[in-house]
Amino acid sequence: MNRDWLRIKTTPWTLGLILLALLLPIQTTELPQRLDYWLYDQAITSNPLKTPDEVVLITIDEISLDRLGRWPWPRKLHAELIDKLAQAGAKTIVFDILFSEPSPDDQYLAAQMRRHGNVILPVYLSAPTSRHLLSEQLPVGVLSEAASGLGHAHAELDSDGVARGLYLFNGLGQQLWPSLALAATGAKAQRSGSDDAPPYMNIRDQYRAVPLAGGAGSLRSYSFSEVLAQPHSPQRFRDKTVFVGATAAGFGDILPTPFSGLSRPISGVEFHANVFTAKKQGLLIRQAPQWASALSAIATILILALALPQMRPARTLLACATALAVLTGIYLFILLAMRWWVPFASTLLVPLLAFPVSSGLRLAMTNRFLNRQLDDLAKSPQVSLPAPSDRNPTQLLEHFKALFRPAGWLLSEEGETLSARQLSEADIPDNLIPGHWSHVNNCSWIKLPRAGTHYYLGLMLPDGLGQEVIQHYLRRLQLEQTAPADSGAGPNENISARIEKVRIATDRLNHWQQFIRRSFERMPDGIIVTDELGVIRLANGHIEKWFGEPMPSLAGLPLVKLLEGHDPREIPPWHETVSETLTLQQSRTVDLKLGDKDFLIHFAPFSLPDNDQQGIIANISDISELREQQRQYREAIDFISHDVRSPLVSQLALIEQLKRDPSHIEKDQLEQLGRLARRSYHLAEEFVQLARAEQLTETRFYECEFLAIVENARDSVSEQAIEKQIRLQLHDSEDLWLKGNAELLERAVINLLSNAIQYSPRGSDVSVQVFRAGHQACLTIADEGSGIDPEELPHLFDRYRRQKSTELAGVHGTGLGLSFVKTVVEKHKGDLSVSSTPGEGSTFTLKLPVADPLA
């Protein structure tokens, strides 16, 4: 959604107009021109001109000046040079030396020039002084007539002082002279085409950029004095074009070039020799008109403005880099292959500007979008609970009274009692620490500072084990007001304010997610969330535990397969229940059986608010305890209707019989009535004790000594053992302290001992042993009775369950005694087991955790 929104807002018109508006002011600076020069220099220096063999330099260097004397030299020396070169077979001789003043040797020089027939002399355009107009500095008349051609010796310096080219034709007024290199190819002077041009106007035509062979010394050269001193050398000069000029320091023209820069300029004669070479090879570069640069820049703006808004932000940089590389390749192709120099700096600046501009537009619009979202988030509710420390003492007292129901309380403010019951200010202990509870006997006190005022709050808690728990809970409460954290002056910059907004919104979202995640995991029921195809997408820890499936395997598993794999059924089939919930959008509630546990699964359809996606939320409740309670309720009804009702009916029948003939009451009738009454009492007592055991909680636990409990239980059944002449043998080792309920534990041991005595033959032994095994206190009771059948062992501790063999033998029980023992042991987190061999006896083993001495 956000990406589409950005595409709509970042339009080609917006991007194109901004790029054009940025590019136009740049054109008024030197940046585009400097960049054009740099690009040209890099391209030319990377592809130097091939060094020609047909061009040779004869240089007037320092050695020649030392040997031949100071300048100017007699012109007969130049005549001798021409003669030497003519004898060597030089094709063309080009002088970059001005012969504008008459000399006695002019006729001899002119004769040598005519004798060779192809000597080119230079023409200079300059003003004699700063007060005079430009004028042509031609060779003296006799030399001009003897020369085969005249050419101007001017190179063009760009605005940065570097010579990159020259005009092929240059002159004053009507006549344009070819350059020296062009004249060496046979070009002649031509008219300018401006008939009304004044004779002092400098007119130039056909600018060409010159690719050079390299820096100074790239072309083959010989010293002027060396050539004169040695015999003519045809192998050096035959059929070659010879350029003659000055290269000595401080003498002659020096020109900075792309190869040399301003530090190592080359001589004018070497520059013209490079021009001649490029001309002969057809490598001179034409300069494109200015409109070509503007057209390429506008075309690039148009392409990028159309393309970039349609791209994802991650591809914008790649697109701009690709455009820059393609444009650079086009520039090099036009320059080096087509020999056109197009000013491409403005065009190359477009993709460099397009990326930050496009990114800036996206960021600006994203920022506006995020600001709106942040404003919406700021209006959303926070997941937080009001801290107790922010509540006033009166409100705190009301909450404490509603929660703990104290027997008394006191709330006072600086000696003034605000509310009191069974407590007074005289009961307030001394040296209370503000914000910390102090517990004295059954009273808890705290001093609460609020806005410069001290309040005293006291609670008289009810006696019992719950008192300690409540006091521990009170110590955990943070009731002292803390100073708010110093948030500083707050961010001054707009971006910092937005970052702070993002941080607050992120924290709020994180709190929501943590609240939902923890609530989802800590719900009492198992939760499964599916998609519209019934595939599980979310599940909490209860599902993982109850189904025995690891969480990674649950995600992506169809709900039907999960249910069919653990509780297969045919009526109704699981796929029908799940599909109807999705298709009919109706809730379903079905029973579920997992192992020995009973569950109730409620299927509820749902749909997401922002789209049409649907799914199922399956709520699975563990109703095993409820079903067990229902089963126990039915068993209790059966027990009451039979076991309790039967002796009562017998008693009523016997009483009615005695009432008919009260004068003849026999002793056996009274004994029978007493047995029936005792049996009813015993049944009621067993029933009451079992109910007490089931309601036992750890709040009723206290430290007790296990050996003393066993001894008390032995004493309680000793009379029963004496009647059957059964010997109770107690083997003890040490005192064992437990955390539990001694009264119920003693009753459980009594039940075990009573059973052992009841089912043991007369004159036998019952062995009782108390010992410690690791962190457990153990009790074993072994008898020499008839034992228990193996098929009855799994149901021995079931409620209202009696052994068939003992019932047939006339030993009647309630079926609640061993169930009571098992319930008491489980409440104490212990273990109860039995081993029995028919005909040999049974051994009951009870294990309870020993109290931790470090707790």
Image (cartoon, rainbow, N blue to C red):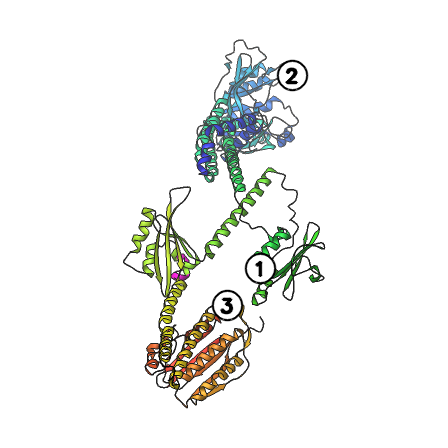
Question: What is the three-letter code of the residue carrying label 2?
Answer: Pro
Q: Secondary structure at mark 2?
A: loop
Q: Earlier in the sequence, mark 2 or mark 1?
A: 2
Quadrant for the N terminus, please: top left
Q: Nearer the viewer, residue 450 or 498?
A: 450
Badge 3 is on which residue?
697
Instruction: Determine if residue 723 is in view.
Output: yes
User: What residue do we see at 39% from left, 76% from top?
Assistant: 814
Q: Position of residue 843 (x, y in %)?
A: 41, 82
Q: CA distance from mark 3 to mark 2?
A: 123 Å
Q: Earlier in the sequence, mark 3 or mark 1?
A: 1
568 left or right of 24 in image: left
- Numbered badge on residue 254: none
- Looking at the rendering, which quadrant does residue 547 occupy? bottom left
Magenta segment main secondary structure: helix
Magenta part of the chain: 545-552
Badge 1 is on which residue?
405
Instruction: Determine if residue 341 is in view.
Output: no
Quadrant for the C terminus, please: bottom right
Q: Earlier in the sequence, mark 3 or mark 2?
A: 2
Badge 2 is on which residue?
128
User: What residue do we see at 56% from left, 45% from top?
Assistant: 504
Q: CA distance from mark 2 to mark 1?
A: 120 Å
Q: CA distance from mark 3 to mark 1?
A: 20 Å
Query: Taking 617 as reference, is 102 above or below it?
Result: above
